[in-house]
Image (tube, grey):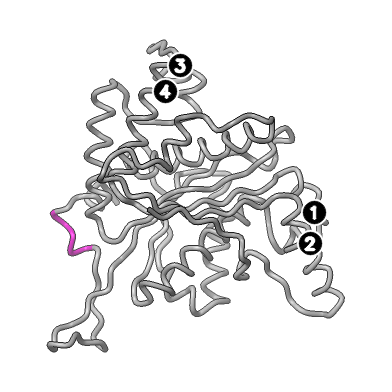
Amino acid sequence: MGNNLLDSTNSQADYSSSDSQFGPFGSKRWTAVIHCFFDDSGKESDQGNPYVCIAGYMAIGDGFWTLLSNAWAHQLFRHGISWLHMKDLMADQDEYAALKWDWPKKKSVIEDFIKIIKGSQVIGFGVAVDAVAWRQFPKELTKSEGTAQEFCFMRIIRMIGDRLKRVRPDDWVVLYYDCDEQFTPARFARFIGLRKRNPELKQYFRGFSIADPKSFPPLQAADLLAWQSRKDLMRKLGGHESRPEYKLFFEQTTPFDVLDYVSELWTGTELEEKIVKPWIASRQAGKPWDASERNLDMQKEVNE
């Protein structure tokens, strides 16, 4: 797949007809394809890493993605970079090494891209897990729940599925992640397994794709959100306040900004109370258990 996905001239590709349903005037009803772009930050295997996070954005059709991508490309051109990748930017690696940007310049660039995200009105989702607590899980439990990254992935699916069921029950989703050799096989296996086990979520999740972030600006936006979210959690863990650029995600700075973000933070306490203890009780009762697919009340919403 190429950049045509984000080309507004090809908007018909984002809709599929349903022969069995008709509108009030006899015309066919159209079902929207919702594109979702996500990225992760932090690795469970890194013993010094306290959090694992997956975050990103969704929007119906391609119009909002075209708006974001065009503005994103313009800012990349303005700042003389080919793409935005937070890990490399902050470490002055790869193409950023020659730029020698100081922190005020980096902060300004980051804020330019955050403003684009808010102005494009895409909907944000995020899940973070206490990686320290997850690493202490019984091996029998991690065999079913997988890694912390896999758990975040499945919770993201549950959150999107809940939103669709509530407001867009006839639409369906295509998920996009970056080309990560370490995480992609497990994510795809979880995606296929979910479709086999859960007919309702199978109805909503019909596509899984990996893509090159350099060619897909929405994946760069997901990287920005995931990186900032995990860093903010680490700051709070150290007793520090959120940085201004993170707060900017959730501040309406123009009349055109739409703030719609849903998140889950699984601390060690929540993991113990809502996963470990129920899992032990289920084993004792001889019942199956899969926390990632349960509708656990952990969501925090920002809607303005």
Q: Which mark is residue 103?
A: 3
Residue receiving disc 4:
107
Disc 3 and disc 4 in contact, CB within 8 angstroms: yes
Give the Cα separation between the discs numbered 2 and 4.
Answer: 40 Å
Residue receiving disc 1:
137
Q: Secondary structure at mark 1?
A: loop
Q: Position of residue 213 (x, y in %)?
A: 38, 40
- Describe residue 131's horizontal placement relative to residue 196 as left or right: right
Give the Cα separation between the discs numbered 3 and 4.
Answer: 6 Å
Give the Cα separation between the discs numbered 1 and 4.
Answer: 38 Å
Is residue 10 in the magenta section?
Answer: yes
Residue receiving disc 2:
276
Disc 3 and disc 1 in contact, CB within 8 angstroms: no
Give the Cα separation between the discs numbered 2 and 3.
Answer: 42 Å
Disc 1 and disc 2 in contact, CB within 8 angstroms: yes
Three-letter code, disc 4: Lys
Image quadrant where residue 178 sits = top left
Three-letter code, disc 1: Phe
In the depicted structure, whether residue 190 falls above or below residue 266: below
Three-letter code, disc 2: Val
Foreground label between 2 and 4: 4
Q: Which residue is depicted at the point 25% across and 55% down?
A: 62
Q: Position of residue 225 (x, y in %)?
A: 46, 41
Q: Which residues are magenta?
A: 9-13
In primary-sequence order, the first of circles 3 and 1 is 3
Q: Main secondary structure of the magenta part?
A: helix
In primary-sequence order, the first of circles 2 and 3 is 3
Foreground label between 3 and 1: 3
Three-letter code, disc 3: Trp
In primary-sequence order, the first of circles 1 and 4 is 4
Q: Secondary structure at mark 2?
A: helix
